[in-house]
Image (tube, grey):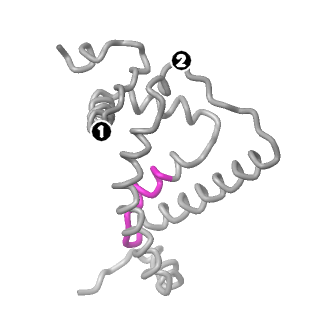
Amino acid sequence: MTLSLPDWLAPIANQLEPWLPALTGTGILMAIASVVAIPLFIARVPENYFTEQYLPHTNRNLLGWLLWFIRNLFALILLVAGILMLVLPGQGLLTILIAIMTSTFPGKYRLERAIMRRPGVYRAANWIRHKYRRTPLQHPDGTSEDRINGD
């Protein structure tokens, strides 16, 4: 079975063909890593991370700036790989999501809070925290968990 690509995509696909096994392997690795990393991340995040009271730490020394640069460089590589995986085999959207979570950019905290305001995401995150015996996350709007669950 051969796939027919649109004419505009054929030149790009021909140049990327040698990279297909690596990109596919990266996609599989990212899928496995996300199954492990995302629950651990949710379990480790402070319970007030999505509230107004949480203030991210911004004091950086030389080592802090170096780690910030490496972190964002890694996120950029993941973002490019994720975009490529949208048209090639792999977990493109998942890789893009991990790139956003890894990076630091203006408005990132606001985006994370907007995502956490979705009732299904909020319930799923607290379900994971419950499995790890952690205190439930505080809702970004300061509403109680009962109101979120519709009780």
User: Residue 47 sits in which quadrant?
Assistant: top left
| Residue at the disc numbered 1 | 128
Please tell me whether residue 92 belongs to the stretch shown in magenta: yes
Check disc 2 and report its element: helix, strand or loop: loop
Residue 126 picture quarter = top left
Residue occupying the point 26% across, 13% down: 147
Residue 95: percent from the left, percent from the top?
45, 58
Of 85 and 128, the residue lying toward us: 128
The disc at residue 52 is 2
Closer to the camera in the image, 85 or 126: 126
Q: Position of residue 19 (x, y in %)?
A: 49, 81
C-alpha gap between disc 1 and disc 2: 22 Å
**Label 1: few (<14), some (14–19) or many (≥20) C-alpha neighbours in 10 Å:** some
> Compared to 120, does 1 lie above or below?
below
Q: Residue at x 41, y 61 (%)?
A: 92
Above or below, comparing residue 40 to residue 11 in the picture = above
Q: Earlier in the sequence, mark 1 or mark 2?
A: 2
Residue interval drawn in magenta: 87-98
Q: Secondary structure at mark 1?
A: helix
